[in-house]
Image: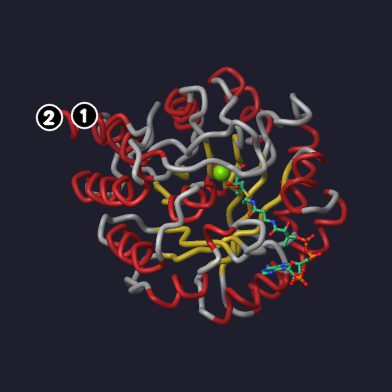
Amino acid sequence: NWPASVTLKEVGPRDGLQNEKVFVSTEDKIAWINQLSGTGMKSIEITSFVNPKWIPALADAAEVAKGIERMPGIVYSALVPNRQGLERALEVDVDEAAVFMSASETHNQRNINKSISATFPILREVAQEALSAGKSVRGYVSTVFGCPYEGPVSIDEVIRVSEALFDMGIGELSLGDTIGIANPKQVQDVLDILLKRFDAKKLALHFHDTRGTALANILVSMDMGITTFDASVGGLGGCPYAPGASGNVASDDLLYMLDAMGIQTGVNPEKLLSAARFIQDKIGRALPSRNLQVGSSN
Ligand code: HMG
Ligand code: MG
């Protein structure tokens, strides 16, 4: 029971780069995002307006947002944790603010230095201001399938945080498997519950591939009606406040699977692989994407 088409959201320039030790120069980030804009991706998360002391890899957020070419029809999104971040993002006119929090208390605290209850009013204000500035707002909930500090996360907490984010006016909620711990059976169980409350069209799934289960999890999600997935070219990335977490599912591996299944995405595989090769060269190590490895050994 597969969808005819799927929307891929490229998060490599944000989620991919935020945890890399190599600082990719502003110029290279801009060149890379411009390449991604030419792949057919309709949404690119270009950077993050968080405290640069916490995420030095993205300290050049404003320069990147100002430097890239904006292609019509593409939503250029950025992560925004608070009002200060929103002001910085609005100054450089990003299209979308992505707010984020966790379903587990300890991860929320380590990641954004606040309790869950203290985070709600901050994000509500960000969402309201972004919406009144004519921007769209996306929400992330992290640790949906497990927390690196607390272990299993209660579905009731996931529902509570998700409802709070939708109440703030977010247009789409991305459910994060922050530490890549989910399995297909668990994804089925979680979606079974969430889809009774939320519209599948307003949910995205954000799988990290730490344990190699991301594509299997995506398959199950598609079977249950989910048609939007976040991914990073090359499988770049991780989460600095999730010990052991590795990259997002590789956009190029996901695209290979979808193309082979006849599921439309509008993304060009050769262009996507060449964007993956570009950032692999800049990072200076082999990235986890399997298709990238096939490409290099042939
Ligand atoms: P804080 O230290 O509690 O902030 O950080 P504060 O409000 O007390 O301010 C302290 C200092 O931070 C001040 O500067 C502020 O100006 C500055 P100082 O006076 O010390 O020089 N500051 C800022 N500077 C620039 N931009 C801002 C900003 N806000 C405050 N927006 C804060 C709170 C949230 C800012 C901090 O904890 C932070 O930046 N955290 C970011 C963590 C992060 O980026 N994590 C990774 C992204 S989330 C993720 O990867 C998961 C996801 O992919 C989904 C999944 O996989 O599950 C989305
Ligand atoms: Mg992530």
Residue 286 percent coordinates (x, y) = 33, 36
Residue 160: tell me if it is visible. yes
Q: Quadrant of ligand 1?
A: bottom right
Which residue does the numbered mark 1 point to in the structure image?
A: 294
Residue 114 in the image: above or below residue 240: below
Residue 267 in the image: above or below residue 254: below
- Do the CB atoms of the residues marked 1 and 2 lie less than 8 Å apart? yes
Residue 224 percent coordinates (x, y) = 51, 30
Which residue does the numbered mark 2 point to in the structure image?
A: 298
Residue for point 74% across, 24% down? 152
Q: The residue tagged with tag 1: helix, strand or loop?
A: helix
Residue for point 62% across, 44% down? 240
**What is the number of callouts on the image?**
2
The kind of residue on which mark 2 rests is Asn
Residue 85 percent coordinates (x, y) = 66, 70
Question: Where's the N terminus, which quadrant?
Answer: top left
Q: CA distance from mark 1 to mark 2?
A: 6 Å
Residues packed near mark 1 inside 10 Å, few (<14), some (14 to 19) or many (20 plus): few
From the viewer's side, name the closer residue of 69 and 97: 69
- Horizontal relation, residue 110 to residue 53: left or right: right
Residue 68 in the image: above or below residue 197: below
Q: Which mark is residue 8?
A: none
Residue for point 78% across, 29% down? 150
Residue 228: tell me if it is visible. no
